[in-house]
Image: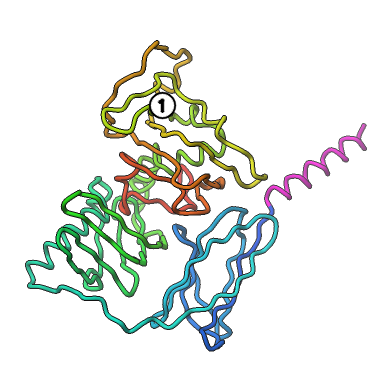
């Protein structure tokens, strides 16, 4: 009997060790001439993981759990490179080449001081967002922003990292802005870039406030939803998902919540695949989601989108998602509504766990 217990204990320990196996992402950075590039910034987008290449152009990230990552390499004078990295059951080894940045300058409309102030005001509102968290963010180096205008379109770029302090969430964010566009005529905003998070130092009282604010920002977020989809706990986590039967407002909804499990496929022990052709309306309503009984109607429900409601569809044929709520291709989803309005001021690093 003791021998059987020992064998079972050894098996359990082995399985536990396998479940906790971690890997490395390592690589070498060169220029087009094959020369090693020293001191290039290398980071995993949306995380706290950042480093620099050594004199041999080598970088390494240790203790990486399996998942999907967007690795970014940036160096002044070169065009930055971003590369999707999937860590599954072994170390990821990369060879990256940086190309010289073109000296061709885009036409920049500088204008007078009042014009730039107006452009900056528009940028901050649409880049950081309008939430309580966003309004407590400060961009420390706005002088890096170059603005240009074409009819109703405002564009912005930078050559280096924007430094953003989020005083509500306690993060300092370095954001490498590739492009920003705001169309005054349509009100549509789009931007592309990568970020590095650092914890700010604060008093015990500030740390407690940041902890509470981070939990509020996380609850009902897109990150929260994707993690619950991965764990098959959307209803338990307070999310309700409905079929959208039309393509315009007000929304025509199937009145019964959808079980997302039917659209989820296991890729392996580290990834799931989301695959569907529907449009879904998603709300975070923990009290309603906890109800045992579902009210059924014979007809569709007509509904104007709630302030906390989101319409989601796949932009690509599928989406590959990992346990931290990261997905392989940033183009995977098309989102309108609440999640679409959560901008930089409400972002959390992928390392975040409720209670941090």
Q: In which quarter of the image is residue 336?
A: top left
The quarter of the image holding the N terminus is top right
Q: What stretch is highlighted in magenta?
A: 1-20
Is residue 10 highlighted in magenta? yes
Query: Is 4 drawn above or below residue 193 in the view shown?
Result: above
> Is residue 98 toward the left or the right of residue 154 in the image?
right
Q: Could you tell me which residue is drawn at 19 percent across and 69 percent down? A: 148
Is residue 51 highlighted in magenta? no
Q: Could you tell me which residue is drawn at 7 percent across and 73 percent down? A: 112
- The percent coordinates of residue 306 (x first, y second) are 28, 30
> Is residue 29 toward the left or the right of residue 160 in the image?
right
- The percent coordinates of residue 234 (x first, y second) are 49, 31
> Is residue 173 toward the left or the right of residue 60 in the image?
left
Q: Which residue bears the numbered disc 1?
A: 286
Q: Could you tell me which residue is drawn at 61 percent across and 71 percent down? A: 94
- The percent coordinates of residue 343 (x first, y second) are 31, 51
Q: Is the magenta stretch mostly helix, strand or loop?
A: helix
> Is residue 272 toward the left or the right of residue 140 in the image?
right
Nearer to me, 355 or 125 = 125
Q: What is the secondary structure assignment of the residue under circle 1?
A: helix
């Amino acid at each position: 009997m003791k021998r059987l217990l020992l064998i079972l204990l050894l098996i359990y320990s082995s399985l536990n060790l396998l479940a906790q196996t971690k890997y490395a992402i390592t690589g070498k950075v060169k220029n087009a001439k094959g020369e090693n590039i020293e001191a290039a910034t290398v980071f995993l987008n949306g995380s706290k993981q950042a480093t620099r290449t050594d004199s041999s152009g080598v970088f390494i990230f240790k203790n990486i759990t399996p998942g999907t990552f967007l690795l970014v390499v940036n160096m002044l004078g070169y065009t930055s490179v971003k590369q999707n990295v999937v860590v599954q059951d072994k170390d990821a080894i990369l060879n990256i080449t940086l190309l010289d940045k073109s000296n061709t300058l885009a036409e920049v409309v500088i204008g007078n001081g009042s014009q730039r102030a107006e452009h900056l005001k528009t940028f901050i509102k649409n880049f950081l967002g309008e939430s309580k968290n966003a309004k407590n963010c400060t961009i420390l180096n706005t002088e890096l922003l170059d603005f240009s205008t074409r009819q109703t379109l405002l564009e912005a770029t930078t050559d280096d990292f924007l430094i953003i302090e989020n005083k509500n969430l306690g993060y300092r964010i370095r954001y490498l802005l590739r492009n920003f566009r705001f169309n005054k005529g349509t009100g549509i905003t789009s931007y592309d870039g990568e970020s590095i998070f650092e914890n700010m130092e604060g008093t015990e009282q500030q740390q407690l406030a940041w902890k509470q604010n981070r939990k509020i920002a996380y609850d009902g977020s897109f990150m929260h939803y994707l993690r619950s989809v991965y764990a098959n706990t959307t209803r338990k986590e307070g999310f309700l998902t409905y079929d959208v039967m039309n393509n315009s407002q007000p929304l025509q909804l199937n009145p019964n919540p959808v079980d997302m499990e039917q659209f989820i496929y296991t890729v392996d022990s580290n990834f799931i695949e989301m695959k569907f052709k529907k449009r879904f309306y998603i709300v975070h309503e923990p009290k309603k989601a906890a109800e045992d009984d579902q009210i059924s109607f014979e007809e569709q429900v007509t509904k104007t989108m709630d302030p906390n409601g989101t319409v989601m569809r796949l932009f690509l044929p599928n989406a590959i998602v990992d346990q931290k709520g990261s997905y392989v291709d940033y183009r995977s989803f098309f989102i309108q509504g609440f999640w679409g309005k959560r901008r930089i001021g409400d972002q959390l690093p992928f390392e975040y766990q409720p209670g941090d």
